[in-house]
Amino acid sequence: MSMHKLIVAAMWAGVISLDFTACGPFMVSQPLVCGPLFGWLMNQAAVGVMIGGIVQLLWMDLSPVGVGIPYDATATTILAVYWATLPAHSALSQVVLALILAVPFGFFFRWLDQLARRMNTRLMHQVERLPDEQLAGALWLGIVGGITWSWVRYTLAYGLVFAFGQMAWNRFAYSPRLTPMDQGLTMAIILLPVAGMGVTLELFLSDNPRL
Amino acid sequence: MKTLALVRTFFRSFFLQALWNFERMQNIGFAFSMVPLLKRAHRSREAFSRALRRHCEYFNVHPYFAPIVMGVIFNKEKSLSETKRSEDPTLTVLKNTMGGAFGAVGDHVIWGTWRPFCAVMALSVGLLVGYPMANGGVQPTVFSDSGAILCAKWWVVGFLSMFNSIHIWLRWRGLQKAATDGPLVVRWVESLHLQKWAAQIRRVGLLFLFTMVLLYFARWTASEMLIWMVAVLLGSAILKRWRLSTFVIFYLVFGVSVVMTTLGIHRPC
């Protein structure tokens, strides 16, 4: 994928991720929404549907409760869709491989979010420092600054991680072969939604959902 | 005039968490959202500035319940202005108490129940309409473009419209009621029977989940494959109950898939 496409993809990923906290949230960042949307943007909606559905079911119980920042399933979905759509027509095993590569980055994006919220504390103090008569205007600037900062950091992070994965993908040059590993990867696309259903089943069966 | 201020606060409340920070959480977003209502409550510039500064302190609530707290605070600020008092020590206590209580309700009802329910419903309907069984129900059509597009429409439009209908209604109606009733809005929230509804919704959600499981499992006819699928379903539910991370479950499933293919259980399509 060309550099231009990578930048455009990262910018869209940044827009989708704004829904995580900065705007709304209207749940556009939920994997079952952002997966198909991003897949459609990458011209492979089917890949987005598969990845979005699997990630949604597996990480159904994620919630931003109190100061706790949950695992970033949005990032996992977007990264997996991007890498899986690198070949013109992805095989099922390549979709799973992209997902395997993307899953650890959910923790990386969570860490980035924690870092960004520490930065927000500084921004908040800047806003508060202003005199009373300028406070209303400063709040406007603070909110606009917060949204811009969120978008910029997400776009940069996605751009860098997209590029890193793309390099790894190209170096690995994985192509589907009739090996047990390839068949295992293909089998995983059937079993991962089943595991997700199991996770969701536990969520619905528990009286007090663990949040 | 009041409706206009309420509308402006309603739209501003969507940016409540734009500057979320570990020290005072949603303070800036709350103060930002309150600007139109505070301007309406306090006629003098000094009183408005003082009130705005007051609301820059710590605040945290479930974002969908924040407009209710905003409405209550507007109501209290208005009475503060009418009685010509400059400070009310109970205001902060009220704000934080409501924040804590609505935070807990929102986490349980919205994050823990309504969102998973909408997701499961959209997923099962999408699976039903998007992936019909081809060739008389023998071959699963996991990777067809037309099916995926149909499925995506149901997931995106179905999920978003269903989830946000309640979300937007709760925000707007809550703000309106709270601005009129003040702290007595808790009676209105109580009358919604959210906890009772949540329990019912979870039961219906379970039904949709079982439908989804049946729809998905019906695509595979080989008994050997079905046994493995049931094992994975129950295994992941048990592992989750034992508080094992989904991250671990994900890689375990991948391991199971490799073992299955090594044992010669291949994908039947």
Image (cartoon, coloured by chain):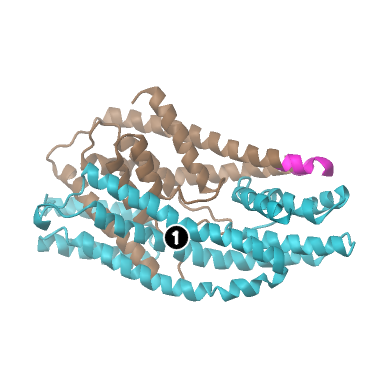
Chain colours: A brown, B cyan
In the current view of this chain or complex, which residue is farthest to the right? B84
Res A48 visible: yes
- Quadrant, the N terminus of chain A: top left
* Magenta stretch, residue numbers: A128-139
Q: Classify B169 as above or below B155.
A: below
Residue B108 coordinates in the image, percent (x, y): 51, 67
In the current view of this chain or complex, which residue is farthest to the top? A3
Q: Nearer the viewer, residue A208 or B133?
A: B133
Chain where mark 1 sits: B
Q: Nearer the viewer, residue A186 or B201?
A: B201
Q: Which amino acid does label 1 sit on?
A: Arg
Residue B73 coordinates in the image, percent (x, y): 73, 61
On screen, residue B84 versus residue B92, left or right, reads right
The quadrant where residue B105 appears? bottom right
Residue where numbered disc 1 is placed: B115
Does the magenta stretch mainly form a helix, a strand or a loop?
Answer: helix
